[in-house]
Image (spheres, rainbow, N blue to C red):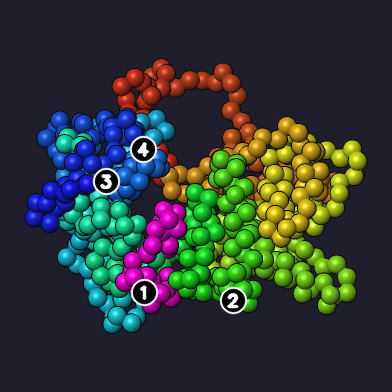
């Protein structure tokens, strides 16, 4: 029998009544927590990492909340870089691991009402850098299950927002009035859908009704943020339940009207789209690594593409250009969200390639090893669509045998923390060859690798053995000097 010790509005769950142990916390996060405590500051493990540990899941990231201000954190860690302007954060870097450390904040005083409640985007916050107490910090978070803190000194879980109760009841509840909080940031609606589906939770009634009431306001959110959240709907191999909830809350009708129309015309809750996404989840779980965004987008667009082919071919009385049809099917999505070219053309080529994979390969045909990983996504899409329709996988297995050395899955490359996964464009010609590296566009969701001087047209390559500058070897990387900040982060003191 669990009991709770209440102090004012705080719920404390002692160590004996929760499963969190230090051995489940990354040593880098422990180092940050201990050093802040030793310096006299409060320091808690916060947010999703506490939630996941309580659910017995392995957290993706570990975040720290503290009453130390950013400059004070910077003074304690030589490997710390301050980032952000509106929301100043400290990133404490340990090799390839970053512990995001933020000062406790409160809801700013200058939340501004710019129109009546029926107007999309009627609320906005002009400042979000007002420091506060742990309780104020918990209450400004989005969902109650994300407002939990873990105290490394006492090993207690601290709850100011009834998150423990909702976690026990598997409820996803917005902190505060959901009608106000969703208008402050409409992207929270997509986060609610993603979290509920991923964690197997039920969205609390008031929160659910608010999402359905304000679904159209998602169109007012920044395009880049919405696109990133769309790709995150595929995360953790839960695309099928996530997109079904995405449709039920009417968010799909606001962001993907063509796909919403298809779902309504093809059986609604019994639409083939859910089966297709379920097979994607199944294959992705077997692979053990996330697939590229290009493949995710191709799977999402495949029902529209299939319907377009079935509609156009009888009308034309002959075969139609599948490449053009694929581009048309993805054109509306691309116009709305400005998809990176690498992702867009990867998805287009994957759809176009399916007609070739329906033909048994000629004897003796082989895929060169250097091209095999790019060819893999086309086979994955073929396997997903055939499994969803109940078709035979024999022809896919025949194509698979052309690549005996192909790894089960090559993880997507590139991208910073929270960025969408990358994916290279692919085109399967009639000779089953793929484009060279020079023809492939940059990775989606991440910047292209900088070219060397030798590969840049119009630049001269510096000869080896040239005159060295005075001052000896470069001392910028000398021992004891902090490493340079990761790409996209601003060092402390920079404008």
Cα separation, mark 1 vs mark 2, equals 21 Å
- The residue most toward the right is 363
Q: In terms of depth relative to the viewer, which is nearer, 4 or 26?
A: 4
Give me the residue at 20% from left, 31% from top: 35
User: Closer to the N terminus: mark 1 or mark 3?
Assistant: 3
Q: Which residue bears the numbered disc 1?
A: 209
User: Closer to the N terminus: mark 4 or mark 1?
Assistant: 4
User: Closer to the N terminus: mark 3 or mark 4?
Assistant: 3
Q: On the rendered structure, is 29 left or right of 72? A: right
Q: What segment is highlighted magenta in the picture?
A: 190-218
Q: Which residue bears the numbered disc 4?
A: 98
Where is residue 67? Give x, y as percent.
16, 44
Q: On the rendered structure, is 126 left or right of 381? A: left
Cα separation, mark 2 vs mark 4, equals 44 Å
Q: Is residue 105 magenta?
A: no
User: Closer to the N terminus: mark 2 or mark 4?
Assistant: 4
Q: Which residue bears the numbered disc 3?
A: 46
Q: Mark 4, residues whose alpha carbon is within 10 Å: few (<14), some, or many (≥20)?
A: many
Dots 4 and 1: beta carbons under 8 Å? no
- The residue most toward the front is 1
Nearer to us of marks 3 and 4 is 3
Let me know if residue 468 appears in the view. yes
Q: On the rendered structure, is 378 left or right of 490? A: right
How many labels, in total? 4
Quadrant in the rendering for residue 492: top left
Cα separation, mark 1 vs mark 3, equals 28 Å
Nearer to us of marks 4 and 1 is 1
Would you place residue 89 above or below residue 200 in this image?
above
Q: Is residue 209 magenta?
A: yes
Q: Which residue bears the numbered disc 2?
A: 264
Magenta region's main secondary structure?
Answer: helix
């Amino acid at each position: 029998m669990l009991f709770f010790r209440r102090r004012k509005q705080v719920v404390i769950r002692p160590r004996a009544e929760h499963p969190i142990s230090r051995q489940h916390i990354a040593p880098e996060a422990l180092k940050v927590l201990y050093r802040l405590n030793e310096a006299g500051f409060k320091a808690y493990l916060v947010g999703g990492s506490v939630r996941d540990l309580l659910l017995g899941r392995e957290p993706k990231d570990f975040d720290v909340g503290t009453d130390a201000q950013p400059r004070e954190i910077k003074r304690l860690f030589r490997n710390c870089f301050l980032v952000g302007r509106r929301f100043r954060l400290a990133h404490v870097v340990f090799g390839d691991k970053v512990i995001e450390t933020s000062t406790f904040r409160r809801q700013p005083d200058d939340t501004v009402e710019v129109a009546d409640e029926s107007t999309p985007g009627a609320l906005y916050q002009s400042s979000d850098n007002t420091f506060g107490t742990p309780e104020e910090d918990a209450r400004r978070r989005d969902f109650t299950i994300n407002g939990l803190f873990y105290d490394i000194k006492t090993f207690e879980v601290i709850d100011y927002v009834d998150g423990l109760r909702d976690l026990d009841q598997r409820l996803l509840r917005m902190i505060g009035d959901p009608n106000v909080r969703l208008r402050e940031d409409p992207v929270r609606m997509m986060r609610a859908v993603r979290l509920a589906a991923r964690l197997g939770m039920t969205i609390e009634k008031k929160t659910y009704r608010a999402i359905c009431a304000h679904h159209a306001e998602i169109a007012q959110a920044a395009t880049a943020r919405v696109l990133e959240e769309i790709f995150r709907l595929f995360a953790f191999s839960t695309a099928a339940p996530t997109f079904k909830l995405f449709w039920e809350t009417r968010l799909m009708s606001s962001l993907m009207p063509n796909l919403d129309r298809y779902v309504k015309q093809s059986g609604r809750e019994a639409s083939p789209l859910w089966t297709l996404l379920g097979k994607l989840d199944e294959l992705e779980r077997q692979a053990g690594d996330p697939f590229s965004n290009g493949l995710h987008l191709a799977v999402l667009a495949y029902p529209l593409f299939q319907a377009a082919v079935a509609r156009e071919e009888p009308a034309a009385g002959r075969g139609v250009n599948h490449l053009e049809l694929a581009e048309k099917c993805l054109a509306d999505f691309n116009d709305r969200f400005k998809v990176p070219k690498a992702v867009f053309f990867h998805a287009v080529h994957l759809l176009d390639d399916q007609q070739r994979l329906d033909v048994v390969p000629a004897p003796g045909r082989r895929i060169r090893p250097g091209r095999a990983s790019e060819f893999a996504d086309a086979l994955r899409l073929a396997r997903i669509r055939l499994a969803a329709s109940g078709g035979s996988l024999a022809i896919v297995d025949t194509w698979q045998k052309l690549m005996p050395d192909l790894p089960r899955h090559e993880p997507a490359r590139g991208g910073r923390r929270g960025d969408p996964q990358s994916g290279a464009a692919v085109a399967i010609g009639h000779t089953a060859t793929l484009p060279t590296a020079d023809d492939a566009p940059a990775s989606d969701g991440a910047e292209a690798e900088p070219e060397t001087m030798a590969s840049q047209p119009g630049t001269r390559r510096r000869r080896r053995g040239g005159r060295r500058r005075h001052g000896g070897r470069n001392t910028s990387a000398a021992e004891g000097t902090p490493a340079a900040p990761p790409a996209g982060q601003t060092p402390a003191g920079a404008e």
